Amino acid sequence: MHSPNSRSACDRFLLVTQNVDDLHERAGSKRVLHMHGDLMKLRCMNHPDHEFMFKGEETLETKCPFCGAGTRPDIVFFEEVPLYMEMIQDALRECDEFVYIGTSSVVYPAAGFKNFAKRFGAKVTCLNLEIPAHDPDTDVFVQGKATEIVPKWCEEFK
Ligand SMILES: [Zn+2]
């Protein structure tokens, strides 16, 4: 999602992922939101905003470094609401272009982001190996391997 207004396009870029690993960060991506959580972190049982990097084995003795409460994995479990939804919805309302990449686009709520962004005026682009189910809100479809078509799209984006 981006908007090339007064700030640079990179300042306005936001990457929302359902991945819980750190591959985006290891690849150098900035402004990443892990809507299903982050395997590298734990979260406080009492204060959801108390999250922290953690290496090792979480046990019942593992405590929140901010308040001393118990902890849990920073992972969204079945039937829990994904993280950062308000921030994501704000970005969807404001973006000029919404791009979804390498997804079957069937897992909600993420599968509905393209429709939400389109309703607020965004151009919707899909970069994917397989042609997704017909979606009238997708304006542009580019078929191919992500390793090939995403760098090309990024060059055109600059
Ligand atoms: Zn805490």
Image (cartoon, rainbow, N blue to C red):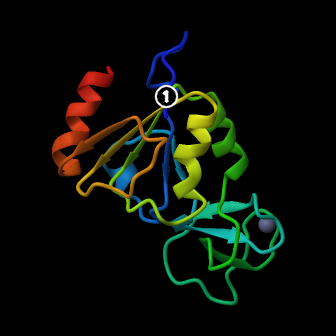
Image quadrant, ligand 1: bottom right
Q: Tell me the quadrant of the picture where the C terminus can be found.
A: top left
Along the horizontal axis of the image, is 107 left or right of 28?
Answer: right
Q: Residue at x 40, y 35 (%)?
A: 139
Q: Which residue is mark 1?
A: 2
Along the horizontal axis of the image, is 29 left or right of 39?
Answer: left
Q: Residue at x 69, y 37 (%)?
A: 90
Q: Position of residue 70 (x, y in %)?
A: 76, 80
How many numbered badges does the structure rendering display? 1
Q: Residue furthest bottom?
A: 60
Q: Position of residue 127 (x, y in %)?
A: 30, 45
User: Does 10 appear above or below 147?
Assistant: above
34 or 126: which is nearer to us? 126
Q: Residue at x 47, y 16 (%)?
A: 8
Q: Residue at x 57, y 63 (%)?
A: 108
User: Does 47 appear above or below 15?
Assistant: below
Q: Quadrant of residue 52?
A: bottom right
User: Does 91 appear above or below 72?
Assistant: above
**Label 1 near ligand 1 (CB < 8 Å):** no
Q: Quadrant of residue 61?
A: bottom right
What is the crowding at mark 1: few (fewer than 14 residues within 10 Å), some, or many (at least 20)? many
Q: Position of residue 144 (x, y in %)?
A: 18, 49
Along the horizontal axis of the image, is 5 left or right of 30?
Answer: right
Q: Amino acid at mark 1?
A: His
Q: Position of residue 64 (x, y in %)?
A: 73, 70
69 or 127: which is nearer to us? 127
3 or 109: which is nearer to us? 109
